[in-house]
Amino acid sequence: MSNEIRQASPVPSETVSLLLRKKAWTVIAVLTVLSVILFVGGLSAGSTMLSPVETLKHLFGTGSGEHNFTIHTLRLPRMLLAMLAGAALGVAGLILQGIVRNPLGSPDVIGVTNGASFAAVFFITYMAGSVSLKWLPLAAIAGAAAVSALIYALAWRKGITPVRLVLVGIGLAACMGALTTMMIVLSDEYSTIRAYRWMTGTVYGAKMSDVLSLLPWVALLIPLSLLGAKSANTLQLGDETASGLGVRVQLHRLGMLAISVALAGAAVAYAGGIGFVGLIAPHMARKLVGRSFGYLVPVSALIGSIIVALADVVARTAFLPLDIPAGVFVSGIGAPFFIYLLYRSRHQ
Amino acid sequence: MFKSNKVTAMMAFILMLAVLIAGCGQNAPQEEATQPPQQQEETSGGNAGNGGNAGAEEEVRTIEHAMGSTPIKGTPQRVVTLYQGATDVAVALGIKPVGAVESWAEQPFFEYLRADLEGVTVVGEETQPNLEEIAKLKPDLIVASQTRNEEIYEQLSQIAPTIVHETVYKFKETAEMMGQALNMDAEADRLIAEWDARVADFKQKIEAKLGDQWPIEAAVLNFRADHARIYVTGYAGDILNELGFVRSEYQQEEADKGTVILRLTDKESIPSMNADVFFVFLSDPSNEPAVLKTYEEWKSHPLWQNLDAVKSNQVYVIDEIIWNLGGGYKSAHLLLDQLYDHFELEK
Amino acid sequence: MTHLFPRTVYKWAGLGLSLLIFMAAFAASLAFGQTPIGLGTVWEALFRHDASVQEHVIVITSRLSRAAIAAVIGASLAIAGALLQALTKNPLASPSIFGINSGAIFFIVAAAAYFSVHSLIHYMWIGFAGAAAAALMVYVLGSAGRGGMSPLKFVLAGAAISALFVSLTQGVLVTNQQGLESVLFWLAGSVAGRTVDMLLPILPFMAGGWIAALLLGHSINILTSGEEVAKGLGQKTLWVKTAMIAVIVVLAGGSVAVGGSIGFIGLVIPHIARGLVGIDYRWIIPYCALLGGSLLLLADVAARFVIMPQEMPIGVMTAVIGTPFFVYLARRRSRRS
């Protein structure tokens, strides 16, 4: 039996891994090109449709400068914020799925997003009158961090196992969700719609200062997560095996969890409760480049940023003159993808 | 990877650094503060239709408002209003805005204003106006509210001088603010004086009619598909208060606590609605059968029959747009008209 | 695992006790509220009704229907939860955690917003459809991939599907503010302000579900002793499973149509029932019904007092009560796994 198998695969293993590496880099390149196209295209679209050439001229400072305000103040921050948030959520989801060892883990399922939502809605409902709205992102991050710490503490029993983490997370997510709904129900009218919009996820009104606040988180944490790539790959084999191979399981898990929560918390703080990116992006990444964490990180980031940016462009152009929260369209993309996932998984 | 403590320490250090940077980014001084309007010269060519206050003296007025102070040069000709009340006041002042937000019902604009708003561009919903649409109109004054537009104040200020009122339903203050900004102080004062005169007239006539019974308790009730509401304060509540109506003891307590709306889910709480006269409006026109059904259910409940207003047949179904959604000056007058009619007073 | 009532005699006694608890909870629901009404008055209101006495009126018109609805929904959700836990072999299953509630809600909200559906009967059928769709999706998603079905996969699949439907619901409501204001209370879970004629159309279906569950008790026992064992004993497992899913969908979908999103009852009560009578589903089902009804009745009473004069949505109440229990279970359970 084994002789036949050996004869059937004459390709040496080094060639396979070389092919894989080439494929991964090709994917990254293609996605980057797509991102650039989306970037320019998105900046050209809106109430006033511009040609891509015009947009490019405005970006580089040549040209008439007639649309400077539209492009630089209105569209550019939104696009950048959407891309950053999408990238952060994509990687956050990837990390969580690794920790939980299940492709369905994501910040919205495990309760991180719900914690941020709770804090944000609390802020909007009870403090928006007295405290300036510019502190809202901080409140959201604090909420995400606090709830994550709570989940971690409750799931700790001489260590964290993926199962316990998921279960406690889901339970707390449901609780936070109910409390958040209660606040929305009992709030006054203005807070209700504002809170609900926030929860859906939106980059409306994004400013460059928001982009600059989110940037350090993304720029530092995503490369940081790559540091844990080797351990992440090893941990796929199981806790004991990895431990035997020298991985400090609990420490790694804590570190990666912290990075994931920080990424998700920051993204949600500026883009609201956008869901599904953390779920879908890593999935698609896995289909494209396999299971190696090192490649999955940039690919998830790129896919995540494309999804959110695309959703925002559609959201602000499809129903002019209305400007709809981007989260609606992320769900719109997420739902068919989910169904597709289900359809495919029937055969596995 | 994580074998050495040094790596862990470095990670922690980098994380702290990131937090610090983010914190600094948050507190960066907001350089994009209010900018003086640059569009005066550009747009003066396209304003043939806007008669009235020509002779734009280049004096700069500074308007103090809820989110700071805004200098305004000359007389703004192209106004964008971002809440219903402001649109209403603009029309009352005789101005046609170049852009306004969509109305809550009877889209795109309420019928009582529609004739005066021919050709006005819709710039999105009140809850989320479309910044690009606003910019496209090249306005020279934007009237916004803090409750709705706080987070985009900066961007609005970059498009045009923006004046902001704290909330959306205080029509007299809105009129004052807009009068100042539009260099129409006299007109605004006249409008307010007109209102005050009518209020005084109403008070006199109703006191004459009801004698000892005045002042009476009024309650503003609202029925929706799955719950009922008492509007303790808010637009209608404030106007009724100004006219001399009082609230029931219970509702006054709630008002003092700062409650604007009481949501009632159980008919057991019907007694808390009690007052001498009810002004009822039904919500959510798209959902009418359910709303009517709920109203019928609450009305047919025995506890309802025990209410003072019901017993003395003082339950009036009034118009939601005038009493709640409009929030403006003209709607206030229409509200007052309805009150004159209900109490059969001479206007 | 030992349970409290090993002998049949005890089980019957326990059932009687549960019935008493249920009746007490029902009475409490009639007595306590914004207007305090003594038990004696409640009795009079029920059996010697005098329409001129305000308290009598309150009891009959407002509280009776509310208590009936709470009892029905509580019983139904508890039974649905028990069945779901048996079906997925996962003690952490419940209609809300598995996204079944969210599916029903989304379908109903979408129907109301886009197809102008307004009658309760239609809501009920649409609720069934939504619950079924969600159940199907969770089932497929949970059994996909390597390793077939596992409790953890189901829970994650359920949470993901739940997030999906919640997200879609938000999408529908965020563009429709008036619509949002109308359904907020229902969304958060509410048994208040509903008259008996909201319950009556649904009651036959719910009752049918309860009876079906009772009849299925024996088959469930066989099923839970293992797939191969069941097949070996000649059981048509596919039929049994389908029947169970149908009952779950009817009970959960119907509950959502009337009361909105109420969670955790289906999680907590089956556990208590199992702790009392072991794993015999012929006993578990009736215990679930009585205890589930009691719990929701008591939660409803509490919800009236927490933020007087406004009421806390009952879905929030059950979440607040149920979460510590859930976390406790999660910790205990995964110690063994």
Image (cartoon, coloured by chain):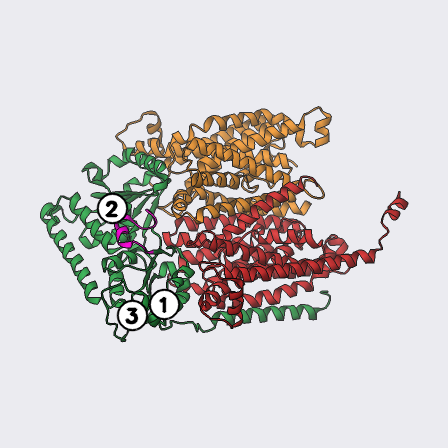
Residue occupied by mark 3:
B63
The residue closer to the viewer here, A263 or C286, is A263
Which of the two discs, 3 and 1, labels the residue nearer the N terminus? 3
Name the chain letter of the residue that bears numbered label 1: B
Say if A128 sits above or below A276 in the image: below
Q: Are marks 2 and 1 on the same chain?
A: yes
Q: Are marks 3 and 2 on the same chain?
A: yes
Q: Are marks 3 and 1 on the same chain?
A: yes
The residue closer to the viewer here, B142 or B208, is B142
Residue A97 in percent (x, y) is at 65, 53
Q: Which mark is residue B219?
A: 2
What's the amino acid at mark 1?
Answer: Ala
Quarter of the image for residue B266 reads top left
What's the amino acid at mark 3?
Answer: Ile
- Secondary element at image label 1: loop
Name the chain letter of the residue that bears numbered label 2: B
Tell me the magenta residue range: B104-120
Question: For the residues carrying marks 3 and 2, which lies nearer the camera in this image?
Answer: 3
